[in-house]
Image: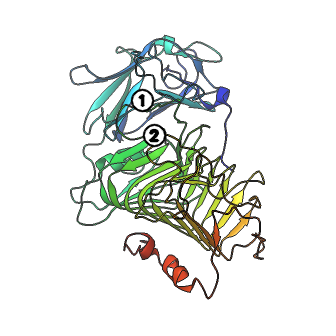
Amino acid sequence: MRIFLALTTVLSVVGGAAPEGGSRGVDVQLYPTNGRQNVNPDAQLKLTFSSPPAIGSSGKINVYDSEDNKLVDTLDFSIPFSPSPYGNGSTKANYTDTTKYQTNIIGGLDFYFYPIIVRNNTATIYLHNNKLTYGRTYLVEIEPSVLKPARGSFSGFTLDRPWRFSTKVRGPRDGATKVVVAADGSGDFNTVQGAIDWAPANPTKHTTIYIKNGNYEELVFWQYKTNLVIRGQDREKTIVGYPNNSAFNPPNRQGPSRRPAFSFRGSSDLQLSSFTINNYYPGQAEALLVDGVRTILDHMTLNGAGDALTTYGTTYVTDSKLTGTGDTVLGYGSVYWLRSRIESIGPVTWTRTVQGIHGNVFVDSTIIGLEGNSTLARLPDNSGGVMDNWPYAEMVLISTKTGGISAEGWGPVQGPPFDSSHVRFWEFNTMDLQGLPIDISQRLNVSRELTLPKDRKILAEYKDPANILGGWRPVVLTA
């Protein structure tokens, strides 16, 4: 089951600091420590107190280059974070809204973001991406009004008494094909996004980003990269996530969706292996949005809400798990699922495949309706849309175990009459969780049961990933 956090405790947006050791009235530990050398430029700044700090509504955090005191970055806490700062407002874009919100450019796209997130007693400062560089010494100034500690006073940092650290002289060597991400600073990068920003766009060999165990709370997005492998140290202990949804980051007039925790577009020959991606907000909130060709998801865990996984292009999913809260797979692309598991509150998929491509094909997998009355796929009323009812929607189950699925299995299929003869809601050898055949006598009439020997040729075609994925034969790269 995906993790839901109460909106009142999910986030505190705070600021503030004091010299390490509490010499100005409150005990605080700093990362990086005051005066530290060899810091990665993408490091998030952390302050750990004896109790959770409270939110300030004004003040600034400024970062200066020590050589000439030039301002490098600033976070102004009088600027609101989002039209819906707790992700619980309107999911529609208001294009007449001229308010300035906290904005970070990530992978070339503008996102609303939290400049500080508090978890337990630690306040993590998120500077704007790519503002710091190698071989520099930085001075951090934090105005007192940014933070209200639970106990004691906190005077902040000034340029006369700054928080000081120095970055590494240089980054990974030219031509490197593997880098390490470690939240404690022991790797080449502290953040997943930092490593992705470094990765070459079109290398001749695969570039591997290895993520050490840890909790990486960050928005991740990139565009137009190829031959990239992102691999976690341990699937359950390497966690990348962020609180985001269509209310916190509503749509732009143009450009990709901004509501996923982790997303990419225009990429090819990508593999994600052995880590967890969480979206901590409800609503329309993908854990992952895939937009590319020849994408592999291998031994992944994805925890989202509505549209928990959105797919475009061609994707091969093996030995992975997805959890969501309805339309859990929003499928525009061709996806071959092998030995994978989906747990869904409400409809498992809304498949939007168009004529000429395949949709979601599940082989030797498991599908669970968490509230006991889910359906496998739905086609809601889209009257007036370009693709009313998606008449070429496809979802095929082959030797898949199910539980918590309604007797009708599929649907609802709504709206005005349309030609459903091209809809492929098919299943073969559907079983219960104990591996016993289920009764499909009440299935929706749009669906079809495949049988032997009649459908032997169809089954052979659908068991072969290359037939589903446009001729691509996926090869999962191992460590």
The percent position of residue 17, horizontal first and vertical second, equals: 49, 21
Left or right: residue 152 compared with residue 432: left
Left or right: residue 100 compared with residue 155: left
- The reply to whether residue 51 is visible in this rendering is no
Residue located 58% across and 82% down the image: 455
- What is the spatial separation of the Cα atoms under label 2 and label 1, in whole angstroms? 27 Å
The percent position of residue 339, horizontal first and vertical second, equals: 59, 71
Residue located 53% across and 57% down the image: 275
- Residue 59's image quarter? top left
Give the residue at the far bottom of this rendering: 453
The percent position of residue 292, horizontal first and vertical second, equals: 37, 56
Q: What is the number of the mark on residue 382?
A: none
Residue located 41% across and 71% down the image: 477
- The reply to whether residue 393 is visible in this rendering is yes
Left or right: residue 60 compared with residue 438: left
- Residue 41's image quarter? top left
Pointer 2 residue: 219
Q: Nearer the viewer, mark 2 or mark 1?
A: 2
Label 1: which secondary element:
loop
Pointer 1 residue: 34
Q: Residues within 10 Å of mark 2 (few under 14, many from 20)?
A: many
The foreground one among 103 and 289 is: 289
Image: 372 above or below 197: below
Residue located 45% across and 40% down the image: 219
Looking at the picture, which amino acid does disc 2 mark?
Answer: Leu
Looking at the picture, which amino acid does disc 1 mark?
Answer: Asn
Q: Residues within 10 Å of mark 1 (few under 14, many from 20)?
A: some
Quadrant of image for the C terminus? bottom left
Image: 424 above or below 242: below
The foreground one among 389 and 321 is: 389
The foreground one among 108 and 35 is: 108
Image: 87 above or below 231: above
